[in-house]
DNA sequence: AACCAGGAAACCG
DNA sequence: CGGTTTCATGGT
């Protein structure tokens, strides 16, 4: 009958599910997962089969994260893959000890990190999704960016239903690859945004671009070079993707407006910091500049 | 209405 | 190269 299969994931020492939930709920327009009563609902397609998950803190007091599979139990290999995905997505495998040590003695970062100790760097494991989201986010405000993503997902992705709940999936590369730029423009994508996004989708669909070829033994600098070779992708986008998808802990979107605002806020300044100052501050955060950036971003959201 | 937004390319000395 | 201008489109 209603037999439910669960997987429990070990959590790292410093882990605060509440902070993770807060990050995941920062936009009302987020369409690729839902959060309800401290449970995250998320769907994947693994080798053609949908896998529906409810992710929450386990019942045991050990601080485990548990995945409950909905609408049928996947086979063990798919459960393992789903579990790997969640581990990567919610960043359950990184030891933040060195980062916390470093932050502790940093006047700017110290208070920020102390206040949100246990927040993880929420990732975007799919390269296509990460690149798409980042291209969408170029030079527009976040609210609009979430709207554009939603339109992309609703128009070209599939939607699963389970017990009245909708699970939306990011479009497949092959599907996006055949979309015409005009279709995206009619959804209020700018022409260049549409072209870049479709260029990326075609590259991923053709196998000319993959996550594997951008990760180790590839260095951050090499990954950046490969990504910025694509028209429409500059240093900001490359580092953003390196940070959220490729998991380079030192990825650093130097020119990011949100980062600048967060630094300004911490310094109590009226003006945004000059780039030279941003670089100087960040040099103390190596090799964790990506985590520093993510924590600083978290100071901008609601409370 | 003006200015801004989790930029990138093209252009120019 | 390093700085400047243009592009593009909604949000506030």
Image: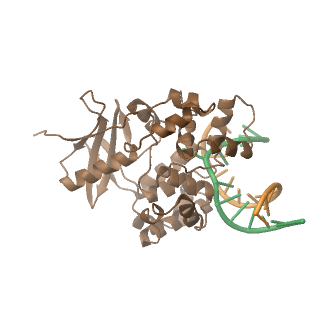
Chain colours: A brown, B green, C orange
- The residue drawn where x is 31% and y is 35% is A56
* Along the line of sight, the residue nearer the viewer: A294 or A35: A294
Q: Give coordinates of residue A271: x percent, y percent.
A: 75, 35
Front residue (pair A150, A230): A230
The quadrant holding residue A285 is: top right
Look at the image and tell me whether residue A160 can be seen.
Answer: no
Decide which of A25, A144 is in the foreground and name it.
A25
Residue sitting at 28 percent across and 44 percent down?
A: A53
Q: Is residue C3 left or right of residue A246?
A: right
Q: Is residue A224 left or right of residue A69?
A: right
Q: Residue furthest left?
A: A1
> Quick check: A50 above or below A229?
above
Residue A294 percent coordinates (x, y): 53, 41
Tally of numbered discs: 0
The residue located at (59%, 61%) in the rendering is A233
Residue A35: name its quadrant: top left
Quarter placement of the N terminus of chain A: top left
Q: How far from the left and from the top, in percent, is residue A159?
A: 34, 52
Residue located at (45% from left, 55% from top): A129
Where does the image place residue A67, in percent across and percent down from the top left?
27, 41
Residue A33 seen from this side: yes
- Left or right of A138 on screen, residue A158: left
């Amino acid at each position: 009958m209603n037999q439910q299969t669960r997987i429990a994931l070990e959590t790292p020492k410093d882990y605060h599910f509440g902070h993770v939930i807060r990050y995941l709920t920062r936009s009302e327009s987020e369409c690729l997962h839902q959060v309800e009563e401290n449970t995250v609902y998320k769907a994947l397609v693994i080798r053609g089969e949908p896998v529906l998950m409810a992710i929450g803190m386990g019942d045991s007091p050990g601080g485990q994260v548990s995945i409950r599979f909905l609408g049928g139990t996947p086979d063990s290999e798919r459960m393992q893959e789903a579990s790997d995905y969640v581990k990567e997505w919610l960043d359950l495998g990184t030891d933040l000890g060195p980062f916390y040590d470093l932050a502790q003695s940093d006047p700017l970062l110290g208070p920020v990190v102390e206040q949100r100790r246990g927040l993880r760097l929420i990732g975007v494991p799919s390269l296509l999704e990460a690149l798409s989201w980042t291209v969408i986010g170029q030079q527009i405000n976040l609210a609009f960016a979430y709207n554009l993503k939603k339109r992309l997902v609703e128009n070209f992705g599939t939607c699963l239903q389970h017990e009245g709940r909708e699970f939306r999936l990011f479009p497949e590369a092959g599907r996006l690859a055949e979309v015409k730029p005009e279709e995206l423009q009619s959804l209020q994508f700018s022409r260049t945004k549409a072209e870049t996004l479709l260029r990326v989708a075609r590259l991923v669909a053709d196998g000319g671009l993959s996550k594997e070829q951008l990760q180790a033994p590839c260095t951050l600098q090499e990954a950046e070079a490969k990504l910025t070779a694509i028209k429409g992708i500059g240093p900001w986008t490359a580092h953003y993707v390196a940070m959220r998808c490729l998991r380079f802990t030192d990825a650093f979107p130097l020119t990011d407006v949100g980062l600048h605002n967060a630094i300004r806020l911490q310094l109590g300044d009226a003006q945004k910091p000059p780039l030279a100052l941003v670089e100087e501050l960040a040099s103390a955060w190596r090799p964790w500049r990506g985590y520093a950036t993510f924590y600083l971003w978290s100071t901008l959201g609601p409370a």
